[in-house]
Image (tube, coloured by chain):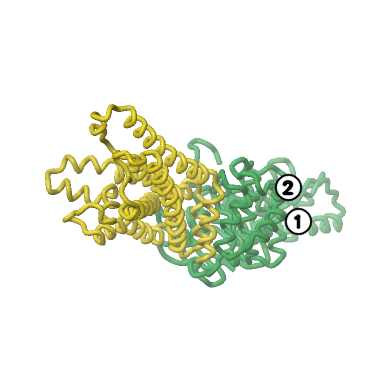
Amino acid sequence: MIEVKELSKRYGGTSAVDGLSFSVGPGRVTGFLGPNGAGKTTTMRVLLGLDAPTSGEALVDGLRYARIRRPMLRVGALLDAGALHGGRSAFDHLLCLARTNGIGARRVAEVLEQVGLAGVARKRAGGFSLGMKQRLGIAAALLGDPGVLLFDEPVNGLDPDGVRWIRELMRSLAAEGRTVLLSSHLMSEMELTADRLVVIGRGRLICDTTVRDLAARFDRGVLVRSPRAAELAEVLTGAGAAVAPDPSGGLAVTGVDVSVIGDLAARHALPIHEATPRSASLEEAYMELTAGSVEHRAHGSAR
Amino acid sequence: MTGVLGAEWAKIRSVRSSRYGLLAAVAVVLLAALVAWNGARIWDGLPPGERGSLSGAGPMELVAPLLQLGAGVFGVLVVTSEYATGTIRSSLVAVPRRWPVLAAKAAVVAAVSLAAGLVVLAASFAAVRTFIGDRPLPGPTGPPGEEVPVLAATALTVVAAALFGLGSGAVLRSTAGAVAAVAVLLFVLPPFTFLLPEPWGGRMAAVLPSGLAVRIAGAVPDPVLSPPAALAVLAAYAAVPLGAAAVMITRRDA
């Protein structure tokens, strides 16, 4: 369980997080989305006690992180997979972390096995590919078998195999009843992995919703083509739908479900050549939601 | 706390630079032996009438600053390598109270630099005495009762240099900055003592690390610093930067 309450964090004159509140429950993957610079990493840093909040608080299982004894047993985090001493082996890297929380060498070997790095456990981490470093970072997060997991941009720079592996791992961790918060600036990734979405921009909450609700909110109606379009439009309007000519030549119907349209057409013996439910892709929905809060935008580019 | 200590010990053991440091320590002993051997050779080659003209620094005066510099840089790297690689964040997330991380680093750095300092000093001492023999050359040729306290005090200055490096590294979070601080203390400030008018030159020389070992051992009579006062000054070189680091590491965003 993660609770962020009225959290604000300023660095000098710049506000990174501004009155942000949301909570993340167990048993599902929550996507933490926002454009670059939206405050995702800052929020995670405050949650992990690395940065002190300017005001408000961020709690894990009802506790401020700094008050947790042996925190790795409760919270696992991947912030920056590149944060490694290149000369240290994967095993030693994890062992150094494990020791601080009283975790033994056997558990280190176990997590290395789990992330598929057992074969290179004694190799210097400096020679690892980005994908291997991400796996090592995830292994570190799993060391204490924690109930709460935070991953900051875990799929950045991964190949498709690695992306799929992370996606399945996140879902299985959530299925075991853990709280999983996964940050990303890519909606397409979240669409496949997350159940819930917390979208932020410029340090503020934009929406806190489920993937399904977000898709429904950006419903664009149904495109219908029929050789007897005028009659069909009349019938549909009579049933309470809003009908407008679509630029592509058919009818843009909103307000009724595609099944209702089909039933109405059948009842009036009107032929239908096409009926396509249209919704903005989640990607478009996300772009629309965050349009006002993009920190750095190339001038002159249409969104 | 034992876990954090174990982790810090594992961190030092698991990187190659620690082994290179030990090799450098062996090189210091060899260097001291070489200088002593060379001095003895020159002495033997001179006609007896000119032997008295041989003077200069003894081999042990070479060992102490090299050890202090090596220990200082070691102390710096133990903490700044974590800032440079970003692993400090994992370390502090794992131990959110933070000060135990610094305390464990200080304990391990002190233990390693004390052990290495004692071994290198003892080995250099033995090698130098062997080569000089009973020739009246500059060097640790006095009776062991006089020489051992100076060696022990020198080992303490090595530990203080290491902890000064650790504290500076944790405050500055930069390898270059902290190594510069160590170099200024050990090598840049001592020549300044000759530029200051007396009695200030002498006073400054007395409180710099380079002059503390003999004063702690009571080997030179000094009206400015008694042995306990000299020991307190040495402790301050370690305690002040470490104290500042302890305050800053707990207060600052990591």
Looking at this view, is A175 or A289 the one in front? A175
Residue B64, position as x, y percentages in the image: 35, 45
Local crowd size for mark 1, using a 10 Å CA cut-off: few (<14), some (14–19), many (≥20)? many
Q: Secondary structure at mark 1?
A: helix
Chain A colour in the picture: green
Left/right placement of residue B241 relative to residue A59 reads left
Q: Determine the chain carrying the residue at label 1.
A: A
Rendered yellow, the chain in question is B
- Please tell me in which quadrant of the rendered image residue B215 appears: bottom left
Residue A227, position as x, y percentages in the image: 82, 44
Lower position in the chain sequence, tag 1 or tag 2: 1
Q: Which mark is residue A251?
A: 2
Q: Residue at x 72, y 54 (%)?
A: A113
Residue A22, position as x, y percentages in the image: 54, 65
Residue pushed farthest front?
B48
Q: Amino acid at mark 1?
A: Leu
Q: Which mark is residue A236?
A: 1
Q: Residue at x 45, y 43 (%)?
A: B25
Looking at this view, is B108 or B172 the one in front? B108
Left/right placement of residue B200 relative to residue A86 reads left
